[in-house]
């Protein structure tokens, strides 16, 4: 696996490059999460299995509707108080107030550490602030709790691309597409990176 070879290279990098080492280590830890883990209401698990099955064979229009339903279920913690923290954090993030969003999401992860979407939401806020190491740590938590989280995988791919690691980024994007074949923007990212990598190989 290309990302494993990258890890060997990163072991010898200088301190200023440790962010890359941390990012790859986090992915390796999350790459083989425990199967069958679900961090929301138990009654949603079977419905999510059905939706992911439908997502595999859906066309682009249908996949958008299925994705919306998946996100709706992922956002259900099973607690009205925790759902309110998620809602408030997302509202703050939508307004560009990432510090406030992180405060809400941190309260959420503190009180509901098994709720994957709290970690994912905070990862997004950290990403927008350029705090990639913290974002990757939260992506790791997200994927450990919810291995099918295509959004977390897409976010990790974006971080790898941002720190100029095109090969592992491509691998992660392809993993996201294996789960959600019509994930918005990821097809374009894959083509972009394939072109870039092919150019480097010439």
Image (cartoon, rainbow, N blue to C red):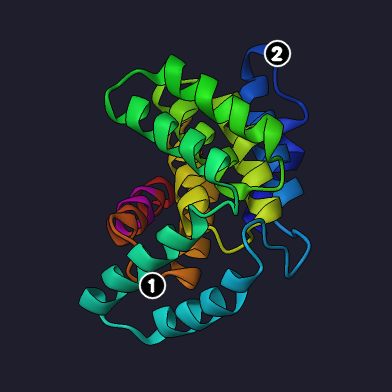
Relative to the observer, which residue lies in front, 113 or 55? 113
Q: Residue at x 35, y 48 (%)?
A: 196
Q: What residue is shown with label 2? A: 15
Q: Which SS does the magenta portion mostly show?
A: helix
Residue 88 occupies quadrant:
top left
Relative to the observer, which residue lies in front, 114 or 18? 114
Residue 51: percent from the left, percent from the top? 46, 78
Residue 138 occupies quadrant:
top right
Relative to the observer, which residue lies in front, 64 or 20? 64
Is tag 2's residue or tag 1's residue first in the polypeptide sequence?
A: 2
Q: Few, some or many C-alpha atoms within 10 Å of disc 2 (few <14, some 14-19, many ≥20)? A: few
Residue 181: percent from the left, percent from the top? 38, 72
Relative to the observer, which residue lies in front, 71 or 28? 71
Q: Is residue 116 above or below residue 161?
A: below
- Residue 193 painted magenta: yes
Q: Is residue 111 left or right of residue 150?
A: right
Q: Magenta stretch?
A: 191-196
- Residue 74 painted magenta: no
Q: Residue at x 61, y 48 (%)?
A: 116
Q: Is residue 97 above or below residue 26?
A: above
Q: Is residue 117 above or below residue 182?
A: above
Specify the farthest residue to the left: 61
Residue 55: percent from the left, percent from the top? 41, 78
Circle 2 SS class: helix
Q: Is residue 78 above or below residue 141?
A: below
Query: In the rendered structure, are the residues bearing label 2 and label 1 in contact, judged by CB atoms less than 8 Å apart?
Result: no
Q: What residue is shown with label 1? A: 181
């Amino acid at each position: 696996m290309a990302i494993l070879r990258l890890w060997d290279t990163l072991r010898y990098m200088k301190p200023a490059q440790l962010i890359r080492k941390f990012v790859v280590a986090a992915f390796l830890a999350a790459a083989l999460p425990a199967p069958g883990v679900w961090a929301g209401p138990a009654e949603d698990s079977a419905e999510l299995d059905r939706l992911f099955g439908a997502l595999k064979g859906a066309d682009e229009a249908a996949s958008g509707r299925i994705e919306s339903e998946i996100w709706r279920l992922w956002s259900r913690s099973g607690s009205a108080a925790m759902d309110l923290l998620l809602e408030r954090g997302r509202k703050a993030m939508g307004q560009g107030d990432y510090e406030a969003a992180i405060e809400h999401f941190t309260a959420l992860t503190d009180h509901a550490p098994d709720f994957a979407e709290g970690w994912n939401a905070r990862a997004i806020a950290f990403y927008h602030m350029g705090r990639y190491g913290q974002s990757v740590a939260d992506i790791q938590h997200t994927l450990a709790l919810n291995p099918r989280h295509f959004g977390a995988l897409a976010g990790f791919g974006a971080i790898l691309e941002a720190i100029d690691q095109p090969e592992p980024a491509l691998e992660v994007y392809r993993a996201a597409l294996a789960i959600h074949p019509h994930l918005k923007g990821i097809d374009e990212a894959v083509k972009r990176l394939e072109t870039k990598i092919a150019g480097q190989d010439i």
